[in-house]
Image: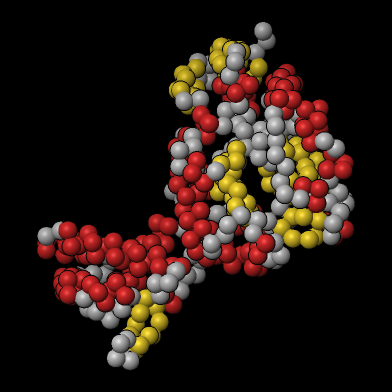
Amino acid sequence: MNGRTREYLRGRFGDYYRSATLSLPPAADEREWGHIPWTAGGTTMVRHQSLLDVGDLGDFLARESPRHVYFSAARYADPGANEMDEKGWRGADLVFDLDADHLPGVDPEATSYAEMLADCKDALLRLLAFLEDDFAFSEMETVFSGGRGYHVHVRDESVQELDSEARREIVDYVRAIDLDVDGLMEKRPNETGTLRDTLRTEGGWGARTHEALLALADDLESEDREAALNRLREFDGVGEKTSKKLLKAFETNRDAIESGNMEAGTAKTLVKKIAREVVADQTAPIDEPVTTDVRRLIRLPGSLHGGSSLVVTTLDRDEVEGFEPLRDAVPGRFTRRDITVDLPEPAVVEFGGETTKLSAGENTVNESVGVFLMTRGAAEKARE
């Protein structure tokens, strides 16, 4: 990025901040603040600041027009202290980060930005299901990061004093790290007092596996016998003999299976196979270092992401599924005029709900498209 482009973007980011209204996080005066200015290279972090150092945040952002803005997940007695050990840690929000570049099966070289963001939103919905259903967290803020993914801030009082190890256990649970599949079942007495292998259906991975098992039972019931047998044989290690035993168990012992009794037929074997499928389908690939770091700096909602120009956007729970980042996080201030940018090579840009084909050299585009390309290093500001 050349100097002309940096100065243009710094000026326009400042214009955005002069008209934006940003909300502070809870206990904002107890948090560390940091930002990255528009310097060559764009990676110089200015941190160890408190709101006392920064002053009025709106005035600071309009004056400095930083490339990126952050605040700490942690709360401190003295957030402006230059040494971490001198800050006086008081607790920290539990923060989850989903990054499209790190999703299993996503190749950033072969997948468009729009496609990666769609995949990341699917992962976000899986994560929210864990946080709501398995942990019953209530004080949560969901945020589009402005870049490649999403953040979830959990602010329940119960998480504030968790250390890194405790937070790692939560990560391991959500990602099913070293999940004990055998441990999803336990010996429980039936109505006659006989101990039976019983699936833990009260919650967690046991309940998720049980739900998938019942869904399979419904599918088998709706199919003819041969199709049902073929469906069971799709499971690794299930042959002709085993599939017939399993189908009979589903047909004659549905009540037992619904109660979690895995003694019917060879259901116990099938549960282990289903559990592995459930793990593959439902885990959320969160970034462990972000969640386990009790002093992490995270992007400020309402600020602009200096690598995309998109707004770091807070989402209500019912807004998540319909949210389209490349449409809904575009700053309105950058949509009101056209500018000229210089591209080193042709490009197809999916942005603002439209697909724009651009040639190498100078192109006149809507400013929102131009700023997006410049922040991503795909264009320079042309002389006008």
User: The C terminus is located in which quarter?
Assistant: top right
- Residue furthest to the top in view is 384
Can you give x and y, in whole percent of width and height, for residue 105 in the image? 44, 48
State the image coordinates of residue 15 (x, y, percent, origin top left): 72, 22
The image quadrant of residue 143 is top right
Point out the residue furthest to the bottom here.
193
At 72% from the left and 38% from the top, the residue drawn is: 69
Q: How many marks?
A: 0
Please tell me which residue lies in front, 355 or 72: 72
Question: Residue 138, relative to residue 236: is it above or below?
Answer: above
Left-right relation of 377 to 34 = left
Looking at the image, is 144 positioned above or below residue 167? above
Q: Nearer the viewer, residue 316 or 205?
A: 316
- Asked if one can make out residue 111 in the rendered structure from this viewpoint, the answer is no
Residue at 71% across, 58% down: 92
Q: Position of residue 213 (x, y in %)?
A: 30, 66
Residue 13 lies left or right of residue 360; in this view the side is right
The color scheme shown is secondary structure
The image quadrant where one finds the N terminus is top right
- Residue at (70% x, 35% y) in the render: 22
Q: Name the one closer to the observer, 39 or 321.
A: 321
Q: Nearer the viewer, residue 174 or 156?
A: 156
Where residue 7 sits, quadrant-wise, is top right
Asked if residue 341 can be seen in this view, the reply is: yes
Locate residue 316: give its quadrant. Answer: top right
Q: What's the residue at 38%, 62% (across, down)?
A: 278
